[in-house]
Image (cartoon, rainbow, N blue to C red):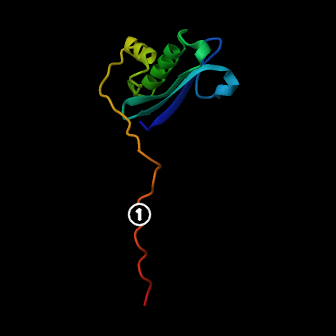
């Protein structure tokens, strides 16, 4: 199977839509994207607008992604979520996800700098 990308939306009326509709066009209450490759599907960019939270929007999006992933021979799902996002973690755990590993960010103490450039080679002689 070649890799594939899918975007799922749930509109304000709770209707699920696939990647053919843009967020602005469907008045989305939430969206999520997925990338399938090698039997696995990565779940990315899960978003629910604040007014639609706790109404099953994210659950519908994950279900649509799961159906799409299965149809694309990549039924094993994975995602990343910030440890402090307790609501999302509860949702994902209720849908069968479990923690595998943790990660952290490193922050630069100052402005980003470029590495020094090598000295120019001398020209012909």
- The answer to which image quadrant residue 123 occupies is bottom left
Spot the residue most to the left: 100
For the N terminus, the image quarter is: top left
Q: Is residue 17 above or below residue 94?
A: below
Residue at position x 62%, y 28% in the image: 20
Tell me where residue 25 appears, x and y as whole percent: 70, 25
Which residue is tagged 1?
116
For the C terminus, the image quarter is: bottom left
Q: Is residue 63 left or right of residue 21?
A: left
CA neighbours of label 1 inside 10 A, class few (<14), some (14 to 19), many (20+) = few
Secondary-structure class at tag 1 = loop
Residue at position x 32%, y 19% in the image: 98
Residue at position x 48%, y 19% in the image: 62
Query: 97 or 84, which lies in front?
Result: 84
Tell me where residue 12 appears, x and y as whole percent: 65, 14
Residue at position x 64%, y 26% in the image: 23
Spot the residue most to the top: 55
Q: Is residue 54 left or right of residue 102?
A: right
Query: 105 or 88, which lies in front?
Result: 105
């Amino acid at each position: 199977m070649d890799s594939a990308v899918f975007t799922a939306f749930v509109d304000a009326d709770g209707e699920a839509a696939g990647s053919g509709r843009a967020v602005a066009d469907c008045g989305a209450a939430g969206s999520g994207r997925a990338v399938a490759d090698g039997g696995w599907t990565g779940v990315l960019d899960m978003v629910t607008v604040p007014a639609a939270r706790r109404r099953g929007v994210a659950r519908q999006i994950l279900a649509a992604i799961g159906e799409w992933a299965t149809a694309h021979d990549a039924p094993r799902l994975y995602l990343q979520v910030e440890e402090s996002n307790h609501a999302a973690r509860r949702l994902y755990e209720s849908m069968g996800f479990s923690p595998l590993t943790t990660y952290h960010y490193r922050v630069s103490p100052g402005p980003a700098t470029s590495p020094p450039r090598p000295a120019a080679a001398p020209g012909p002689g």
